[in-house]
Amino acid sequence: MKKYTFTEKKDTRSGFGAGMHVLGQQNPNVVALCADLVGSLKLEPFIKENPERFIQCGISEANMIGLSAGLTIGGKIPFATTFANFATGRVYDQIRQSVAYSNKNVKICASHAGLTLGEDGATHQILEDIGMMKMLPGMTVINPCDYNQTKAATIAIAEYDGPVYLRFGRPVIPIFTDADQKFEIGKAWMVNEGTDVSIFATGHMVWEAIQAGEILEAEGINAEIINIHTIKPLDEEAILKSIEKTGCVVTAEEHNRIGGLGDSVAQVIVKNKLVPQEYVAVNDSFGESGTPAQLLEKYGLDAKHIVEAAKRAIARK
């Protein structure tokens, strides 16, 4: 089993800011919009170098989506940025009507997703956004796992023609992917090959899955771990190839178990090869205030719970 180590921790939102800084220098059509959260989205370097390509929309997220849709008509590539709760739940109608329905080239970039927003609590956390966005026809949904992958994904989506939802977060987590990686939309990343159980993880849960894999290895269980950074379009080929080997599945996500990655994987299983599946996700509830680590443990989203889920899946084979 490949061992992943790290020398630095950073938040994935800073990876987004670094990617925007690169795009500001490389792509003159990229425009950044923000709903009064410049510091939280780490946009300062982009704005400093490209003030004429930044629009401060204020606390008016619906207007920001409308402006973004309009900018695409003139050939611009708008990156509309705010907290995930406000980027989806608050403006879903505008996204559906002005962006998805007309297939506008808008990049909706959402920080502070999931439980690990932490102390701000349930009103600012969102656990339904992946489901909401993947149901929109034509919408690409991406949830990268660390700073480097978020930076690479940010740069990659500027070259992709069509609406994108890019989801990232606030907590500081290990950087364990390559700094010079090429991000391929719709192509899952094999973290570790295995034969006993397939663990499909996304976002912050990929690091938890890696830790779970090490615990399982010490107990004689060989887990295959795959990073599903693109939830839509889903890499069905990678999923099916994995379950052919292992015969059982665990999905791990910082999201409601209803409508997220687990449901997408379940659809693949039902259509192609029925195998036992266990969900590691929030069980149909809202979050609450607490540190990211406290919340991941309480809601069953840490490495320990992935290990338990893997053993349940294996027992059901």
Image (spheres, rainbow, N blue to C red):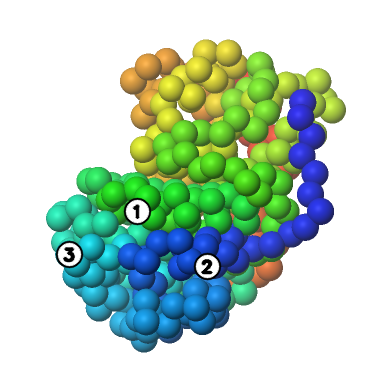
Left or right: 168, with 315 as reference point: left
Seen from the viewer's position, the closer of residues 94 and 212 is 94
Q: Nearer the viewer, residue 78 or 219?
A: 78
Within 10 Å of the Cα at label 3, are there few (<14), some (14-19), or many (20+) other Cα atoms? few
**Which sits earlier in the primary sequence, circle 3 or circle 2?**
2
What kind of residue is marked 3?
A: Ile
Question: What is the number of the mark on residue 164?
Answer: 1
Q: Residue furthest right?
A: 218
The residue that disc 3 covers is 73
From the top left corner, tell me how far across and down residue 231 is, in percent.
42, 42
Element assignment for label 1: strand
Kindly report which numbered mark, 3 or 1, lies closer to the viewer in this rendering.
3
* First of labels 3, 1 by sequence position: 3
Report whether 245 appears left or right of 210.
Answer: left
The label on residue 21 is 2
C-alpha distance separating marks 2 and 1: 19 Å
- How far is the residue under mark 3 from the one under mark 1? 16 Å
Circles 3 and 1 in contact, beta carbons < 8 Å: no
| Callout 2: SS | helix
Tell me which corner region of the image, top left, top right, bottom left or bottom right, holds residue 8. Answer: bottom right
On residue 242, which mark appears? none
Looking at the image, residue 12 lies above or below residue 289: above
